[in-house]
Image (cartoon, coloured by chain):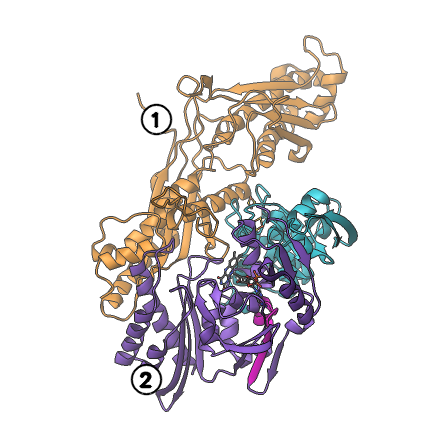
Chain colours: A purple, B cyan, C orange
Amino acid sequence: MIPAGFDYHRPDSVQAALSILTEHGDEARVVAGGHSLIPMMKLRMAEVPHLIDLQAIAELKGICIDGDTVTIGAMTTQHELITDDALADFAPIMREAALQIADPQVRYMGTVGGNVANGDPGNDMPGLMQALDAVFTLVGPNGTREVAARDFFEAAYMTAREDDEILTAIRFQCPIGGQAYEKQKRKIGDYATAAAAVILTKEGGACTGASIAMTNLSDTPVQCLASAEALVGSACNGEALDKAVTEMLAVIDPGEDNRGPVEFKKHVAGVILRRAIARAWDRG
Amino acid sequence: MAKQIITLTVNGETHEVAAEPRELLVYVLRERLRITGPHVGCETSHCGACTVDMNGKSVKSCTVLAAQADGAEITTIEGLGNPDGLHVLQEMFREHHGLQCGFCTPGMITRAHRLLQENPNPTEEEVRFGMAGNLCRCTGYQNIVKSILAAADQMNGNTSSSSEAVGHSNMEAAE
Amino acid sequence: MGWEYDSGDYHTAWDKALATVGYDALRAEQAQMVEDFKAGKTRKLMGIGLCHFTEIVGAGPVKNCDILGMGMFDSCEIRIHPTGSAIARLGTISQGQGHATTFAQILASEIGLPADSITIEEGDTDTAPYGLGTYGSRSTPVAGAATAMAGRKIRAKAQMIAAYLLEVHDDDVEWDVDRFVVKGAPERFKTMKDIAFAAYNQAIPGVEPGLEAVSYYDPPNMTYPFGAYIAVTDIDVDTGEWSIRQFYALDDCGTRINPMVIEGQVHGGVTEGLAIAMGQEIAYDEMGNCKTGTLMDFFLPTAWETPHYVTDFTETPSPHHPIGAKGVGESPNVGSVPAFSNAVHDAFRAFGLRQSHMPHDHARIWKIANGLGLHG
Ligand SMILES: Cc1cc2nc3c(=O)[nH]c(=O)nc-3n(C[C@H](O)[C@H](O)[C@H](O)COP(=O)(O)OP(=O)(O)OC[C@H]3O[C@@H](n4cnc5c(N)ncnc54)[C@H](O)[C@@H]3O)c2cc1C
Ligand code: FES
Ligand code: FES
C-alpha cells in the first residue's frame, strides 16, 4: 500500500504554503501529521498530486495562554496537548480527550489542526471544540477569517474551510466549571462508539450554563443546544437530566457499523452523556 | 514520479538516499538502507511493528512518507544495541521471555525505549497504556510488560524488582 | 475402539483452581452484586467463567494418523561432536515456542551435556530428518519424545565406551547426571565429554567410531493435557463494556520442561482466546465484502485490554511419553475461549439467560442485557 506519486513541498511559512496551494488549486493539499491523510492516500481514496507538508512552519506550532484565552497552533500534536501542564490546568478536558485518541504513536504525529480540518465524524477534537466554543483561524489568498467550531462542520469530510485556506490556529476561552470527556470504544486505537464532551457551570447547587457536543453519532459532531438548555437551572439530575438525554437523542443520527446497530449506539450515547454530565457536575 | 535525495540520520549515521517522496519510511529503511529491524506487520498504522524513533518521538514508519522524514534523526532497534552489546531492554526481554516469534520485538523495544525516556519509573498500568500502540500475537504482553519494568528498574539502578506491582490509575504519566 | 486418556488428575486441578481464586467468596460477592443491581444500587454485574478442559494433542500414532498418507511420527537426529558439544536436528519447526530451549533441555538431561552446548536445528529440509512439523501441540509430545529416545541411544553407546575406558563390564557402570560411574567406586568415572572424545579418537574393539543417533518416534497414543481456567469479568450492563478482573489458568501438561516457556505459551494462548471470545469476527456485508479487514475492526487486544494473568500448574506425567511430557501450546486456546465467554454468560445467569452468542463484543453484550429487560 503505497500512495500514488506526488510532488512534495515543504514551505517554511504560511504565505509560502498558500502560494503553492493557490498555484496548484485542487491538485494540492496540505499534510499535517498525516495520520488521517496518508492512510487515505495509501488506499488511493485520496489523490494528491501536490502534497504540501506544514511541518517546517514554526508559526503553526505552540500553545499560548494569554489571560483567559488560549491559542493553539494547528500543528500542535496530541502528544503536546497531553504533556503541556499549563494547558491541562487551563482546560483539563483537552488532556482528558487527547488521551483517548488513538494510541501513543499516532498521538505523537496527529495534530489538533489535522484532527479538526479532516472533518471525519470519528475524530474526537471537533465535538470537543464545539463544546469549548472554539474559533478556528483560516488563512487564504484573500486574507484571514475566523469561523466558529459550531459553524465549521458541514458533512462528513466537508467543512467551512475553502480548499485554498489553511487552518492556522484554534482559540478558545478558558472553560469555567466542571468538564468531562467520556468516550466508549472497543479498544485502544479505535474511534468512538459514542463520545460526549460536557462543560457545566454551577452556582448554589444549580446549573448556570452548559455546553454539550457528541462525537461519531452523526456525519458531523453534534452540538446539543436543547440538552444544555434543559440542564440550566437544575441540579443536573432527575427530569432535567432525562430531558437533556432525550433532546440529544433527537439530534443525533448514528449509522450501523462494526461497533453495533443503531439502537445500541443510541442507548450508549444516552449512557455516555449521563456519565459525562455526572462527572462534569462533580468536578464543577 | 522523480526520485529525490532524502537525508536521514539513522542510528547516528547520515545517509543520502534517492527515493520517491511517496515511499514509506519503513521501506526506505528496509529496502534502500537495508535496516530491517523495523518490520511491516499491518501497513495500516495499527500494529506498531514498524515503530522507530523519529526526532524523539515513537512513530509508525509505515505511516510516514519518505519525504516527510527528510532531515530527520531516526533510531531503530539496530541503534539501541547489538549482539555484542545488548541494550538493557533487549537484555531484559531475553531474561524475562519478553519475546517469542520476535516479530513485534523491534517495535516493542524501540517504543519502550522512548516510554522510559519520558517516564523512567512507570507502573504496570502506565506501561500497558504506553505500549498500547504495539500489538503482539505471541506473548499476551505479560512478559513484555515485565521486561520493560525490569529494564526501568535496572536503568534506575534498583536491584529489587517491583515488576509484579500493579500501579495506580495514572495514564498521563504514560504519555 | 476410541481413544484412551493417558493420565489425568482432574479433581486436584479443579480444587486447586477454586481455592486459589477464592471461589466461594467470589460467588458471595456476585450474589451481593445481583442484589444491589436489583435494588438499583449498581449497574454492574460480575461473571465467573469456569472451564475445565482436556486436550488431545501429540498426533499421532502412525496406525491412526497420517497427512496425505504420511504417518504422523516425528524425528530427531543427534550428532555429538568430539569436543563434547552436540547438534540435534528435528522434524518440527519453532515459530517462537522456544524449541531451541526446550529440546536442548530434554537432551541435556538425557545425555548430560550442558544445554547451551547443544545446537538445535530445525526447518532446513536439506538436513532435517523427516517429520510432520509443528502444530496442535505435537512438537514436545512427538519430536520431544524422539529427542529423548535418540538421546538414550547415545547414552547406551556411551555406556559401552565408558565401560571399556574404565576397564569394567558394561553392567558395572551406572549413569549419574553427566557421567558413567563405576558402581561402588564413585571416584572412577568418565564424563559424557570424555566419552565423546574417546568415541572418535580411540579404537574400541567391537564398537564403531562416532557418537550419533537417530530416532523416528511413533507415539503409542495421543497425550491429554488438561487445565482449569477461571475468568472473572465485570460487565457494564448499560454499555456492554467488559473488563477482566482476574484470569487464572492452571495447566497440567505432564512433565514440565521449562516453566518459563510454558508460561509464555499460556499467556499468548489465553490472549488469543480473549480476542476470539470477546470480539474477533470476520464479518461480511450483503455484497460479500469483508467488513473487518483491518486491525481496528478485527479485534486484537492491546496490552491495555489484556489482563495480568495468574498461571498455575499441576503435574501429571503421561505414562507413555518417554519423559512424561504432554504439550501445552494449544491448551490455553482451548480453555480460555469458554472461560471468557462463560464469564459473560454467568453474569446474566441470575436473570435467566439461557444462550448467548460469541464474540461477546460490546454490542452483543448490550443486546443480551436488553433482551433480558435490564435496560428498564
Ligand atoms: C490507528 C489510528 C487510530 C486513530 N484513532 C483516532 C481517534 O480515536 N480519535 C481521533 O480523533 N483520531 C484518531 N485518529 C486520527 C488521528 O488523530 C489523526 O492524526 C488526525 O485525525 C489528523 O491529524 P493529522 O495531523 O494527522 O492530519 P493529516 O492526516 O495530515 O490531515 C488530515 C486532513 O486535514 C487536512 N489538514 C491538516 N492540517 C490542516 C491545516 N492546518 N489546514 C488545513 N487543512 C489541514 C489535510 O489536508 C487532510 O485532508 C486515528 C488515526 C489512526 C492512524
Ligand atoms: S506496519 Fe506500521 S503499524 Fe503495522
Ligand atoms: S513475539 Fe511474536 S508477535 Fe510479539
Under 8 Å from ligand 3: the CB of mark 1?
no
**Image vertical order of residue A49 relative to residue C262, above or below:** below
**Residue under numbered circle 1:** C4
**Image vertical order of residue A203 relative to residue A130, above or below:** below
Disc 1 element: loop
Q: Amino acid at mark 1?
A: Glu
**Residue under numbered circle 2:** A235
Q: Residue B76: image x %, image y %?
A: 69, 51
Number of numbered discs:
2
- The reply to whether label 1 and label 2 mark residues of one chain is no
Query: Depth-wise, is mark 1 or mark 2 nearer the camera?
Result: 2
Residue placed most toward the observer, C160 or A108: A108
Q: Chain of mark 1?
A: C
Q: Per the image, is A71 magenta?
A: yes
**Image vertical order of residue B117 relative to residue C163, above or below:** below
State yes or no: discs 1 and 2 in contact (Cβ < 8 Å): no
Q: Is residue C309 visible?
A: yes
Q: CA distance from mark 1 to mark 2?
A: 69 Å
Q: Residue A7: image x %, image y %?
A: 67, 54
Residue placed most toward the observer, A27 or C374: A27
Disc 2 element: loop
User: Where does the C terminus of chain A fall, quadrant-wise?
Assistant: bottom left
Q: Amino acid at mark 2?
A: Ala
